[in-house]
Structure formats: structure tokens, C-alpha cells
Image (cartoon, rainbow, N blue to C red):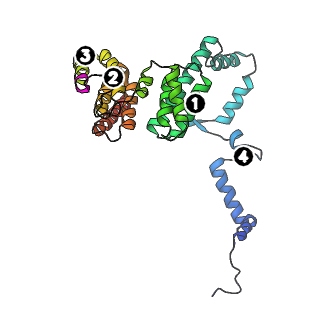
Amino acid sequence: MPNSLTPAMNSSDRRLELYDPALINSGKVEFRRIWGNRVLEDDWRRSGKQTRTIVSGNPAAVVDSASVTASVDSVMTKGSAKWLELHEALKKDVPLTDEKFAESQRNKEEALFKLGKIYRFDLKEQDKAIVTFNRVLADFPKTQHKDEIYYLIYLTLADDDNNRTAWKDKLLTEFPNSTYARLISKRSDKDGNASGTGNPVKEYESTYQLYVDGNYEKALEEIEANLPSYKGGVMEDKFALLRVFLIGKVRGKEAYSQAINEFIQLYPSSEYLPRLKEMKELSALSVEKR
């Protein structure tokens, strides 16, 4: 049972510390140890914070950053040599000409497009991917990636999403002859044989022979033309796997990595999936070593 002469502690009792001379003095000492002597003023953390800079490699010789700033400000008058030098240095990175501005916009377009793919394939944040792809289309209506963006949005949306068909129709209407249109426009029967096509095994062997012979561009052209014909069939993922290898040969590392990610997304039950995941890890390691 608590002593009736001793008051119970509550949260408000800590306010009494503000009136304890010993605690106040201790706090002042600790403040000066961390921040130094400071004038009572607004924004003291930014305007008065001092840093110690080693001069000429001598740890014993240090310069107060505040005094350096004051020294520079005292001579940095508008129109002076130092002012003009700094002004030109800052201005050189600003896209002031039409050519520089166009280059800046291209860089922004590419950065947004890559960001959308990172959201979709690497971070698995599908909503953010769709928002980013739509931003590319809104900010850059003439983007060269428009057909691929239509395709990626179509793939990203859920099967029961009402907008999915709309994106497919946009792709087929605006880019009827693109690779991405062919990838979603045709359907095959359960055996992998589409109307008007030959034997899928023979066609695969023919395309694979082109790959063995080093005729990569021709093989990729044929496989991208024929792959939609076998969509849903037993040979589809095998054609898709060969397409990944060919893209790596023809279109470079970035397109190769994207093709691997697309395969993993489109064929989650494929027997080749472990191999593709291993390829993805090796591809990532090669990028880190560069």
C-alpha cells in the first residue's frame, strides 16, 4: 500500500523539472556540448549550424562554416566576378535552348517509362505501374513506347477489369501490325494449332535452327510472328523461352531482362520457370558487376 504522505506520480509532474535549477543547468551544458553557443533566433538549426572542415589535410586546422559563408557573402555581390562564375556554373545545367529542353524531355520520358516497368515487374506494385504508364501517355502523347504501354497496361489490369478490353482495342486499332498486337490478337486451339498454321513442332525446330545458325534477327522475327498462333497451346511457353534467348542476342540487356520478367509473369506454371528465375539472377549479377 503506498505511503499516504507521498503523492502519486503522474505525467504532469515532469513539468516541474523545468523549474529545477540543477536540471536546467544540466540541459544547458548538454545543449552547448552538441550545438555550441547559439544566439536566440528563429531557424537556428539551419542558419547558425556550424560544421568543422579540415583545411589542407591538417586535422588540427579547422574552419567554421558560418564564417566561410559570411566571407563568401561579403564578396558575392551581383555582377562581381565570383557572382558571374557561380551564375554560369548553375545556368549550364538548365535546358535554356530548344535542343536542350527537348533532350531533357526525352530523358524524363524514358525515366517515367522505366519507372513504370520497375513498378510492374520488380516491385509488383500494379496500381502504381498503371498510374505511371498513364502519366507517360498524358505528358508525352507522341511517345515511341505507346504500343508497348498499351500492351503492358492490358497485361497489368485484372481479367475482370472493364478497362482491359478497351486497352486491347486501342492497341489493335492504333498499332494493328505491331508485335504487341500480334501477341494478344490471335487465339489457338488446345493443341497449339491455329487456323492456317503448320505443325508447331516443325515450326519450332525450323526457328531453333535459325538460332543455332546465328541468324538471330530472322529467328526473332519468325517467332514473334508465330507465337500468337500457339497461344494457349502446349508449345507456347517453349516458343516464349526461345524468344527470351533471341531478344538477349538482338536487343540488349535491358530488353532481355524485361523479356525474362514478362515470361515469369505470363507463364507462372511453366516447367521452364526455374530456369528463367536462374537467368534473372545471373542477369542481375552481371549488371551489379558493371
Q: Earlier in the sequence, mark 4 or mark 3?
A: 4
Q: Disc 4 vs disc 2: Cβ atoms closer than 8 Å?
A: no
Residue 63 on image: x %, y %: 62, 35
Q: Could you classify mark 1 by the number of other residues whose Cα lies within 10 Å: few (under 14), some (14-19), or many (20 or more)? A: some
Task: Give the residue at mark 4.
Answer: 38
Residues at circles 4 and 3 in contact by the CB criterion of under 8 Å: no
Determine the CA span between mark 2 and mark 1.
Answer: 30 Å
Q: What number is the disc on residue 134?
A: 1
Find residue 111 and report its horizontal and vertical position in percent: 53, 27
Determine the secondary structure under disc 2. Answer: helix
Camera-nearest residue between 152 and 92: 152
- Three-letter residue code for mark 2: Asn
Q: Is 75 left, or right, of 178 in this rendering?
A: right
Dot 2 or dot 3, earlier in sequence: 3
Which numbered disc, 4 or 2, marks the residue closer to the eye?
2
The magenta segment is 198-203
Is 39 above or below relative to 255?
below
The residue depicted at 32 percent of the width and 42 percent of the height is 269
Task: Classify 148 as above or below 42.
Answer: above
Quadrant (top left/top right/bottom left/bottom right) for the N terminus: bottom right
- Please report the residue visible at 73 percent of the width from the left and 16 percent of the height from the top: 80
Q: Dot 3 corresponds to which residue?
A: 214
Q: Mark 2 vs mark 1: give the one in front.
A: 2
How many other residues sit within 10 Å of disc 2, few (<14), some (14-19) or many (≥20)? many
Say whether residue 201 is magenta: yes
Label ID, residue 101: none
| Residue at which label 2 appears | 226
Please report whichever mark, 3 or 1, sits nearer to the chain's N-terminal start: 1
Q: Amino acid at mark 3?
A: Gly
In the rendered image, the residue lying farthest to the right is 41
